[in-house]
Amino acid sequence: MNKPNEGDETQAALARYQEDRDLSVTGTVTAATLQALGLKPTAS
């Protein structure tokens, strides 16, 4: 049995979180996702 790539699992979890909260579904950590989590985006 092949184990899915952990990055794929993370991307899928982010997409579900975003969809559940009516955010733009990207599967990546966006400023809106961070805000929904109660976190502030930082400059990179």
Image: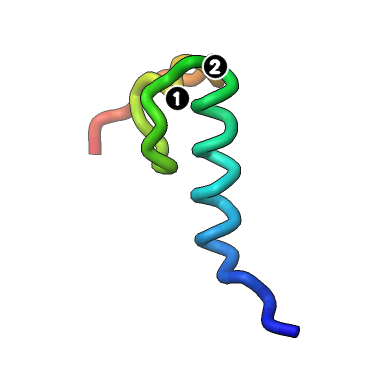
> Which quadrant of the figure contains the N terminus?
bottom right
For the residue labelled by badge 2, is the local secondary structure a helix, a strand or a loop? loop
Horizontal relation, residue 32 to residue 3: left or right: left
The amino acid type, in three-letter code, at marker 1 is: Thr
Residue drawn 38% across the image and 19% down it: 32
Residue drawn 59% across the image and 43% down it: 13
> Which quadrant of the figure contains the C terminus?
top left
Neighbour tally class for label 1: few under 14, some 14-19, many 20 plus, Cα within 10 Å? many
Residue drawn 49% across the image and 20% down it: 39
Residue ID for mark 1: 33
Check whether the beta carbons of the residues at disc 2 and disc 1 lie within 8 A of each other.
no
Whole-angstrom CA distance, mark 2 to mark 1, is 9 Å
Horizontal relation, residue 11 to residue 25: left or right: right
Return the residue nearer the eye: 40 or 11. 11
* Mark before the other along the chain sequence, 2 or 1: 2
Residue 17 position within the rendered picture, expressed as x and y whole percent measured from the top left: 58, 30
Per the rendering, the mark at residue 19 is none
Per the rendering, the mark at residue 21 is 2
Residue 9 position within the rendered picture, expressed as x and y whole percent measured from the top left: 59, 56
Return the residue nearer the eye: 35 or 20. 20
- Residue found farthest to the bottom: 1
Residue 15 position within the rendered picture, expressed as x and y whole percent measured from the top left: 50, 38
Return the residue nearer the eye: 19 or 10. 19
In this figure, what is the number of numbered marks? 2
The amino acid type, in three-letter code, at marker 2 is: Arg
